[in-house]
Amino acid sequence: MIIVLAQTKGGVGKSTLSINLTIACARKGADVLLVDADEQATASDFTAIRTERLGSPGYTAISLTGAAVRTQVLRLSRKYQDIIIDASGRDTAGLRAALTVADTALVPFQPRSFDLWTLDKVVSLLTEADGYREQPLRSFAILNFADSQGMDNAEAAEALRGASALTFLDRPIGRRKAFPNAAAVGLGVVELKPQDLKASAEIAALATAVFATDNDAISAAMMTSRP
Ligand SMILES: Nc1ncnc2c1ncn2[C@@H]1O[C@H](COP(=O)(O)OP(=O)(O)OP(=O)(O)O)[C@@H](O)[C@H]1O
Ligand SMILES: [Mg+2]
C-alpha cells in the first residue's frame, strides 16, 4: 500500500506519523520504503539519527521532490510491500505528485479552528488529484494533538465528518511528550523506554485502520471510538 501524509498546513504531525507508521509496519516484518518528499528533510534527518543509533533503521529511506515522487514511487512500488510518503506542509509539486500515485492519503488535523480552516484547501487538492487518477483516492482525516479533555476533539470530528472527499477515522493521536521524545533519539514511540503505552496503542490502532483493505475494518474505524 502507498500512503501519503498530506496536509498543506505545517506542523500538524505528518513527519511524526510517517515515521511511526513506517516503524509499525517494519516491526511487523514488512519491507517498507519511507519517502521524504519535504525539502525540510525531517524524515531523512530522523532516519540518519536512527541509523547512527541502531546501525540499521529497519526500513529503506529516500528523498524525492516534484514529479519524481510519482515516477520513482511507481517504479519502487513493485519492490516494496508498503511505501509511506512524508509530504511537505505546503502545496508543492511533490505533494500533488504523491496524491496521484498513493492508494491512501492520511490528513492530520489539530482539533483547533484555525487548523480546520485548511479543510477547504485540502478537499480541493484531493478532488483535483482524483482528476488525474483511474480510481478515486482513499482519503482519511484524523486528529493529531488530540486533547485529553474538553469539547474540541468532538467539535473537530463533527466538522471533519461533514467534509467531502475525506472519511473521518476515529483513531485520534493524543498530544503526548513521547512523540517528540522518541523522535529526538531516532525511535518510534513503541520503541521508547519507558514506553508510553497510550501513545503506542494509538499508533497501533491508527496503523490497523489505515492499512485495512476490507470495508468492515474501515467502517469500524469510522464509527467507533477507541476504548
Ligand atoms: N501527537 C503529538 N504529541 C506531541 N507532539 C507532537 C505530536 N505530533 C507531533 N508532535 C510534535 O509537533 C512538532 C511538529 O510535528 P511534525 O514535524 O511531525 O509535523 P509536520 O506536519 O511534519 O510539520 P511540517 O509541515 O513542518 O513538515 C514536532 O516537534 C513533533 O515532535
Ligand atoms: Mg514534516
Image: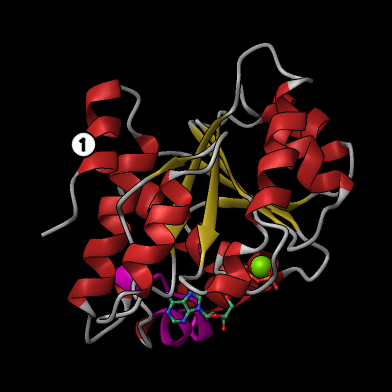
Q: Position of residue 135 (x, y in %)?
A: 61, 14
Left or right of 26: which side holds 42?
right
Q: Quadrant of residue 124?
A: top right
Along the horizontal axis of the image, is 115 left or right of 178?
Answer: right
Which residue of the protein is positioned furthest toward the left in this rendering? 227
Is disc 1 surrounded by few (<14), some (14 to 19) or many (20+) residues within 10 Å?
few
Q: Position of residue 203 (x, y in %)?
A: 32, 60
User: In the figure, residue 127 lies in which quadrant?
Assistant: top right
Q: Between residues 174 and 63, which one lies in front from this camera angle?
A: 174
35 left or right of 200? right
Q: Which residue is at a point 42% across and 81% down the rendered structure image?
A: 182
Dot 1 falls on a residue whose secondary structure is helix
Identify the residue shown where x is 25% and y is 52%. 205
Observer able to see residue 161: yes
Residue situated furthest top in the rendering: 134
**Residue 146, position in %: x, y?**
37, 73
Q: Against 61, is 19 above or below?
A: below
Amino acid on which the number 1 mark rests in the picture: Ala
Ligand 1 has an atom within 8 Å of the beta carbon of the residue at disc 1:
no
What colour-coding does the image apply?
secondary structure
The residue singled out by tag 1 in the image is 220
Q: Main secondary structure of the magenta part?
A: helix
Residue at the location (46% across, 54% down)? 159
**Residue in the foreground of this view, choosing between 117 and 217:** 117
- Is 66 included in the stretch rendered in magenta? no
- One can see residue 23 in this view: no
Magenta span: 179-190
At a point 56% along the width and 28% down the height, the residue shown is 103
Ligand 1 quarter of the rendering: bottom right
Quadrant assignment, res 79: top right
Taking depth in this image into account, of 74 and 27 the one nearest to the observer is 74
Tell me where residue 222 appears, x and y as whole percent: 29, 40
